[in-house]
Image (tube, grey):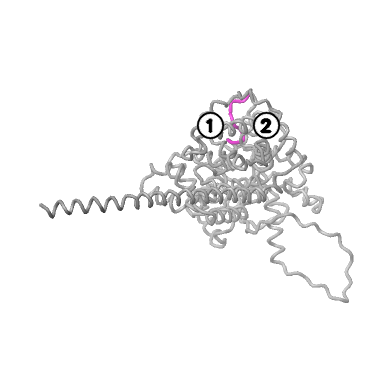
């Protein structure tokens, strides 16, 4: 009994001695945690400031100071606009795991920037748009006021972000015509580079818009750590290509192909969940760099006709569009989501490939040559090989590397012919079908072409299949122009982003070509 009492007494004394020590340890741990948090905040601020110094040369323009003054002169009393309620709801659900974004003061600043931008630029606020504002709000300092945060955000949106969120005219029923069109272009690009995945989505009745809309609206910022958001925005701004977002979208899907196949094999019902939350899993800067590199490879391996279509559809036009122009956007549809190629793509690709193969003639020193008119080389940086499978009954007027298929289409006989053609074509070769007529998507020639395109994708596992826009008739029109003055026409084969004024006639002509898909 005495031993037990003595043991309890000793234990109590030990506890008394240990209590101050334990309290001291707890305080030390808390101090260390606070110190680490301060270091993280300081590192984040340094990262933000460093990033901003890099952004200044890209975002500063002649309108920036005017935007600063506009924001400062705004009375900030009238915060009503059509999507004000959506914005208010977004304030409470955007990055709500971070205490900073729960603060009333922070939410008020986000509301002011988003509201003023939407009202000034006729933009339709969309859920998630605050993710675009946040990287600019976090730049606020004593010497960098909220008005400057707004001005640089506005510059980014107007110069680097395609106008996916432009408002519709009152007479139209589609809320966001450019966003609707952007999703169509994502489907076209996915079907070109990953036809198997596109087919899987179709068979599982999954609309690609359910996944990519959030990526487009937030520029991949949603559910991404803010430090990595700065890295994404930094690389995106430095690209100086607003349309690069399309290649980034396909890049995310492309690098997760095996994960998609495994999910379908395990349980198709999990596929939608994977696209919503599982594909965009960016954890570090290295992953982002690899993702951008993959997107660059996809862009390099995409026909110029795709970028040309994007430019014709005015995704980056700064001026307000007319109702007729937006109606054209709404009418734009590509049957079965196959990429249409312009005749100039086929000509210029053939021109480049032949030039690479032909040996350069060296002129001897004593040899005199008559002066020749310098030939203009077309601007074209694509390096893939393109083969035309000709379904027309006529012979084009300009030479092309093409293969003939018998008429009319017979599945058994043409499967044999296609197999023979593919044996001589590398897997990476791009294939374009040329039909005789392309005036109506219900035309037998068109139906035949799409049957062959599906056969190439599904039976032979071919990527990179397309169809010639306008068919043989458009082909002939192009041949006549190129034969009249090759040098003159080579200067304006595709939309010139550096000299938009040079594109007026080209746009009018080629918008009329697109109408055959409507």
The residue beneath circle 1 is 104
Secondary structure mostly seen in magenta is loop
Residue 48, x across and y down, in percent = 60, 48
Q: Is residue 99 depicted above or below 494 in this figure?
A: above
Pointer 2 local density, CA inside 10 Å: few below 14, some 14–19, many at least 20? some
Q: Is residue 247 visible?
A: no
Per the image, is 174 magenta?
yes
Image quarter in which the C terminus is found = top right
Considering depth in this image, is 41 or 454 the residue closer to the camera? Answer: 41
- Res. 121 mark: 2
Q: Is residue 107 depicted above or below 32 in this figure?
A: above
The residue at the point 87 percent across, 74 percent down is 367
Residue stretch in magenta:
171-179
Q: Is residue 179 depicted above or below 417 in this figure?
A: above
Q: Secondary structure at mark 1?
A: helix
Per the image, is 445 magenta?
no
Q: Is residue 25 visible?
A: yes
Residue 302, x across and y down, in percent = 61, 52
Spatial CA distance of label 2 from label 1 is 26 Å
The residue at the point 56 percent across, 35 percent down is 106
Q: Secondary structure at mark 2?
A: helix
């Amino acid at each position: 009994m005495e031993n037990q009492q003595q043991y309890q007494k000793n234990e109590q004394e030990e506890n008394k001695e240990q209590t101050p020590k334990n309290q001291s340890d707890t305080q030390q741990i808390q101090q260390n945690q606070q110190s680490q948090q301060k270091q993280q905040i300081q590192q984040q601020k340094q990262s933000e400031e460093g990033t901003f110094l890099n952004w200044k040369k890209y975002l500063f323009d002649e309108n920036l100071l005017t935007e600063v003054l506009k924001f400062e002169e705004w009375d900030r009393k009238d915060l009503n606009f059509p999507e004000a309620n959506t914005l208010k709801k977004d304030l409470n659900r955007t990055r709500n795991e971070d205490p900073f974004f729960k603060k009333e003061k922070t939410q008020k600043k986000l509301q002011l920037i988003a509201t003023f931008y939407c009202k000034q630029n006729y933009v339709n606020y969309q859920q998630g748009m605050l993710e675009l504002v946040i990287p600019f709000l976090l730049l606020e300092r004593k010497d960098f006021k909220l008005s400057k945060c707004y001005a640089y955000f506005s510059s980014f949106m107007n110069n680097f972000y395609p106008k996916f969120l432009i408002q519709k005219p009152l007479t139209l029923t589609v809320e966001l015509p450019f966003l609707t069109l952007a999703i169509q272009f994502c489907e076209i690009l996915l079907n070109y580079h990953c036809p198997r995945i596109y087919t899987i989505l179709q068979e599982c009745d999954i609309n690609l818009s359910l996944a990519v809309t959030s990526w487009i609206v937030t520029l991949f910022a949603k559910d991404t750590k803010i430090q990595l958001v700065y890295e994404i925005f930094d690389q995106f701004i430095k690209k100086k290509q607003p349309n690069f977002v399309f290649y980034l979208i396909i890049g995310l899907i492309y690098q997760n192909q095996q994960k998609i196949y495994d999910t379908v094999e395990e349980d198709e019902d999990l596929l939608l969940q994977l696209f919503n939350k599982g594909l965009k899993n960016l954890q570090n800067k290295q992953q982002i760099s690899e993702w951008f590199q993959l997107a660059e490879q996809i862009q390099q391996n995409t026909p110029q006709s795709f970028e040309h279509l994007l430019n014709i559809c005015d995704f980056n036009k700064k001026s307000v569009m007319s109702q007729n122009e937006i109606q054209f956007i709404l009418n734009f549809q590509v049957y079965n989501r196959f990429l249409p190629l312009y005749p100039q793509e086929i000509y210029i690709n053939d021109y480049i490939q032949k030039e690479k193969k032909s040996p350069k003639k060296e002129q001897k020193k004593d040899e005199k040559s008559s002066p020749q008119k310098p030939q203009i080389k077309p601007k074209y940086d694509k390096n893939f090989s393109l083969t035309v499978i000709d379904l027309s009954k006529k012979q084009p007027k300009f030479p092309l590397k093409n293969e003939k298929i018998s008429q009319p289409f017979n599945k058994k006989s043409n499967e044999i012919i296609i197999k023979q053609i593919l044996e001589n074509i590398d897997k990476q070769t791009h294939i374009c079908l040329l039909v005789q007529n392309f005036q109506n998507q219900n035309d037998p020639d068109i139906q035949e072409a799409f049957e062959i395109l599906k056969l190439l994708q599904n039976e032979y596992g071919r990527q990179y299949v397309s169809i010639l826009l306008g068919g043989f008739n458009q082909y002939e029109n192009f041949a006549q122009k190129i034969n009249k003055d090759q040098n003159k026409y080579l200067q304006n084969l595709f939309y010139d982003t550096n000299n938009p004024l040079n594109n007026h006639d080209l746009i009018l002509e080629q918008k009329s070509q697109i109408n055959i898909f409507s």
